[in-house]
Image (tube, helix red, strand yellow):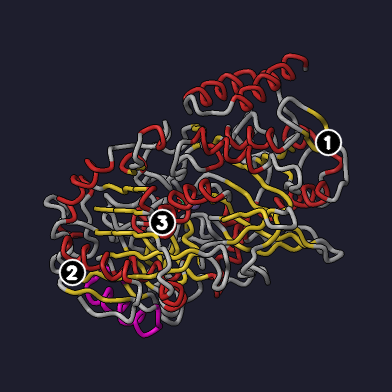
Amino acid sequence: MASFEISNSGLVSWVDEMKRLCKPDSVVLYRGTKEEYDRLADLLVSVGTFRRLNPQLRPNSFLANSDPADTARVEEKTFICSRTQDDAGPSNNWVDPGEMKSRLTKLFDGSMQGRTMYVVPYLMGPQGSPYARVGVELTDSAYVVLNMSLIARTGRPALDALEANAEFVRCLHSCGRSATQSACYAKTWPCDPERMAIVHFPEERLVWSYGSGYGGNALLNKKCFALRIASCIARDEGWLAEHMMILSVTNPQGRKKYIAGAFPSACGKTNLAMVKSSLPGWRVKTVGDDIAWMHFASDGRLYAINPEAGFFGVAPNTSSSSNSNAMATFTRDTIFTNCALTPDGDVWWEGIGYDAPAGTIDWTKQCRDSSETSSVLSGCKKDPLCHPNARFTTSAAHCPCMDEDWENPNGVPISAILFGGRRSSTIPLVCEARSWTHGVFLGANLSSETTAAAAGQVGRLRRDPFAMLPFCGYNIGDYFAHWISMGSNLTRKLPKIYQVNWFKKDSDGHYLWPGYADNMRVLKWIFERCEGKYEVRSTALGGLPYPEDLDAVGLKISSTDLQNLLTVNASELVPEIDSMRNHLNAMGPRVPATLFRELAAMEENCART
Ligand code: OXD
Ligand code: MN
């Protein structure tokens, strides 16, 4: 093995052991410098994994096309192999850790032959933060290394932290080898779709991921460490690792508040975190778009850090009108995956805000002739040019709306927490929890219509508690209890909790709420509620705004539609309560009794109205 300038003996011996197992041709330490980045990008261009985009249009940016069998997170192939099945709980796939290790050892044995094993140390959290943690990923994918170097603090900051013999999370990744993979992608996107396995060993703070090179399956710092493993660490140490964006809102008088929000994948977290306010004098800035690590500090307030350093966002439907800050962020130094390629060497996707030029090549590298392109645009052809889960990977350093304190080592103080999903009916635009426990109840029952971020059917309603169903690394019942216990210390100044839904539709199937920049109006109401303004209208679901308190100046919305958005309909709530009960029962015997008491109280309230 290359002898590294690393004094961490645990790391040296682990790399040695994994090298003996995976048998790479060589082992290379990634130090996170620009020279290394450029060299690896050139390498990926030379083998055809990357296509360099037109430097005049998008400097230092690349397009990668994955194997069509490897385009999203694979939840049914993701495992939490804790010592007992009970600790993984009913929401996770579980196999005995010893058995899983022996299965995977066979797959990893020689899996890196003919490839390089990159050793990628990374820091999750701002440098110097007492809340930051170190991870190391061993991977045979240069594509993974480059993506990680945009979304995490790779190299030096982590190496410095590791010198002190610090603990670190071990992440092993191989794209694997498949006997059956389609010939045209075999070289540019190695993967093993038949035998993919994304496996967590929480007690060992260890992740083994085999067979996929895509997103959360392979960038192990993100979902695997910062959510699944970190949620176990947070339970043990008394903090929260959450699938939440974090933003700041500043009012016209210059007062600022921070809000965190959990939304299932591809429900608009990035757009909300970067929203451009439609209200004069009100400003939003971004702390993070996907993950929040939150701790109560000695002043009794909840503080959040963003453990990441960049964005791995969904490209389709990102446009100058939906998210101009994201559009400005990825004008350069960005990796795009599974987008379409225009004849002048730029990327394109459905919902980018302009038509695809004739001759645009789709994400499977098929050239569509102009008649086909226009038929796609007019909706005649079903297949989109860009994959619905196509992504941009880009560093927060280029984002024009980062909050001044986004890298504050102590984090930012959270005044409100949002839970949101895609619900075409039942759930109002915004609703305030009566208490912390009631907020936990709303979070535990969060639901959404499914999106393309995970493999499987799109548009199906599923309960996704705290947007953590695919990301909670332990028994979800214990997770609910952990949330309740975080609020039970009476000296704490707890954030208020809200449920939001930008996606309610009228009976003709049209969205009632314009969303995007106008979500600022909801943030304003929440901001001012946190300052003690307004009364709420009590309903079985929680406290709703009076329509006149929601700033609708300049908004083209009928009073009927506004009324509809701010109404909880008892006839819709009855089946909702049944569905919540089934869901809480399905989450197993460790679901705290308090949540069933909240459900019973809701049912009584509903019967009374
Ligand atoms: C993501 C996801 O990539 O939630 O952030 O799937
Ligand atoms: Mn996410």
Main secondary structure type of the part rendered in magenta = helix
Label 3 amino acid?
Ala
Label 3, residues with CA under 10 Å away: few <14, some 14-19, many ≥20: many
- Look at label 2 and name its amino acid: Arg
Residue reaching furthest left?
Answer: 179
Residue 443 sits inside the magenta stretch = no
Which of the 4 image quarters holds residue 5? Answer: bottom left
Up-down: is 584 above or below 153? above
Q: Which stretch is magenta? A: 32-50
Q: Secondary structure at mark 1?
A: strand
The residue sitting at 13% across, 69% down in the picture is 114
x and y percentages locating residue 535 in the rendered image = 87, 38
Residue at 44% across / 80% down in the picture? 59
Residue 593, by quadrant, is top right
Q: Is residue 61 left or right of residue 567?
A: left
Mark 2 sits on what residue?
A: 115
Q: Quadrant of the C terminus?
A: top right
Q: Which residue carries the number 3 mark?
A: 390
Q: Provide the residue designation for mark 1.
A: 536
Is residue 40 a member of the stretch shown in magenta? Answer: yes
What amino acid is at disc 1? Val
Comparing labels 1 and 2, the label whose residue is closer to the camera = 2
Q: Give the Cα distance between marks 1 and 3.
A: 40 Å
- The x and y percentages for residue 376 are 40, 51
